[in-house]
Image (cartoon, rainbow, N blue to C red):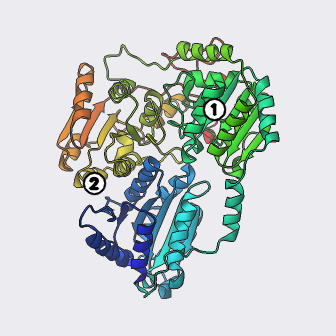
Amino acid sequence: MTGADVVVRVLADEGVEVLFGYSGGAILPVYDAVFRHNAEHGNGDGRDAMPLVVPANEQGAGFMASGYARASGKVGVVVVTSGPGATNTVTPVRDAMADSIPMVVICGQVPTASLGSDAFQEAPVSNIMGACAKHVFLVTDPGQLEATVRTAFEIARSGRPGPVVVDIPKDVQNAKLSYDGNCRLPIPGYRARLRAVEQARLGDDACAAFFAALAQARRPLIYAGGGVIAGAAAPALRAFVDAFGVPVTTTLMGLGGFDTTHPLALHMLGMHGTAYANYAVEDCDFLLALGARFDDRVAGAPGKFAPCARFIAQIDIDPAEVGKVKRVHWHHVGPLAAALERLTAHGRAHGTRLSLADWQAHVARLKRDHAMNYDRASPLVQPQAVIEAINRITQGRAIVGTGVGQHQMWAAQYFDFRAPRQWLTSGSMGTMGFGLPAAIGAQFARPDALVIDIDGDGSIRMNLGELETVTTCGLPLKVVLLNNGGDGMVRQWQKLYFGQRFAGSDKSLRRKDFVKAAEADGFEWVRRLADKAALESTISEFLAFDGPAFLEVMIDPEAGVYPMVGPGASYAQMVTGDFIAAREGDSTVMEAAPVDSMF
């Protein structure tokens, strides 16, 4: 076998179902091996074939692999060429690393003899990616190729997931090799640390200490992050809540980790979280952080976060996250699902009963009195109304991907998420252009599911070329473009903090006709909606269409995202806007903040 054949054989052995990538000279041996593999396995049911999805550019491939991984829980795979092919995947790699998404990126590279010579389409991938990925391999010994690719998958999916990059010179791809079928690299340090974390179990003393503190609490709250989803801990979380009745709020990345329609669900907390979730954080006296890292969009002022919490507990797979931002009183490093199951079993075995009726009633009042709301009387189409209409029809069962900006926050706030892996968004990096390609990847992961990309006119421009990928692949993807003629979130910050000087964020003079663009790329169902009266009927038709559909909605350009907690502000200083009721004595106006704390 050639090295390229070995790469493809490992991909098949690892259960890879689809590849995303763009070809080029330095990766042609692998592409040829993929072609031959699919020709051999494409007969019959074709289950062993690995379709190759070719995007408009490599960044799109990276986000497609990320969307695939986020929707499926499996490792997404990208195959790109050297130089610009590799560097175009830097942003998706960093995005996946920041959100703990398992990916393997296979890059072609110039021959080993040419490394460091500034050869055509050479880039120092190891140096560039080393700061962005979970790990990077440069394979210069052909004999290590098989073990390296297989180990890349092991590292990507284990522990705290993340992207792994394998840089393969062209001569290594062409080398003649034997196939072992089982070999892996000797990485004893990583495996020992991983084994220690994965085998960590809560002892009786730790469980007793946890419940001793919980028993003294009158207002306990669970703060659940993306680790609940990455760690497949949603059933364990639900069992814990059913057993002890503790309310739950989630981060942006944790949406779907707990059914947002559950009576004890408070939806999302943070800078643009629900007012009632943020008020509950203000009121709680016990906080349990699960797979969450107290990031600046949740705890922008760590010293003021959960100010009444006398006890903070934290469970995470990554020891680096424990106590990093907020000092905790009790912690456990290990698999989240196992820890929650152990706590639930311990509490039940010891007859733990919490008297939380008053707290639960308080939470219900918060949800009633400070519910999400917007300008329902406006003659203009409100973006929140669009999300609500889609949500009513889909009943919180759709897979939703987004770009980044106001549309992202509206989608997070107004959609219901009944289960994990329904919500795909660039959380930590906030990468515009993420939504469309990520939704494409999700549709490949879940071909029978309804997948919707909620996008903005600024964000979708970044990867608009991927509309063609949707129709080329015959995907039934639904694209909703909320067009407010500009970079809405930036405009909102400029309005609040920069004296309404809209530098670079006003796109109203741009000439892009998104409807014509979608038609040119082969969408058969394309509409532009500006009439509020036609909202329900148009969205019903849009979602019912059997195939790819594109809906541009001309929304109120002045619509803002509220609530909002300004940079460096506490939840008590949250601004709820004109349509969400604030608690008496809390902020109704935005306070100024230093410019350097803005983003």
Image coordinates for residue 240, horizontal then vertical, percent: 63, 32
User: Of residues 406 and 225, which is closer to you in this image?
Assistant: 225
View extreme (front): residue: 349
Q: Comparing marks 2 and 1, which lies closer to the viewer?
A: 1
Q: Identify residue type, mark 1.
A: Phe
Quadrant for the C terminus in the image: top right
What residue is drawn where x is 80% and y is 35%? 208
Task: Count residues near mark 2 (Cα–Cα under 10 Å), then give few for <14, some for 14-19, many for 20+.
Answer: many
Would residue 386 be found to the left or right of residue 529 on screen?
A: right
Is residue 370 something that shows in the picture? Answer: yes
Q: How many marks?
A: 2
Quadrant for the N terminus in the image: bottom left
The quadrant in which residue 291 appears is: top right
Task: Count residues near mark 1 (Cα–Cα under 10 Å), then give few for <14, some for 14-19, many for 20+.
Answer: many
Image coordinates for residue 354, horizontal then vertical, percent: 72, 21
Would residue 200 be found to the left or right of residue 48 on screen?
A: right
Image coordinates for residue 251, horizontal then vertical, percent: 57, 36
Callout 1: helix, strand or loop?
A: helix
What residue is drawn where x is 60% and y is 33%? 239
133 shown above or below 172: above
The label number, if any, that marks residue 240 in the structure image: 1
Is residue 270 something that shows in the picture? Answer: no
Q: Identify residue type, mark 2.
A: Thr
User: Of residues 356 and 253, which is closer to you in this image?
Assistant: 356
User: Of residues 170 and 587, which is closer to you in this image?
Assistant: 170
Q: Which residue is mark 2?
A: 469
Residues marked 2 and 1 touching at CB (< 8 Å): no
The label number, if any, that marks residue 486 in the structure image: none
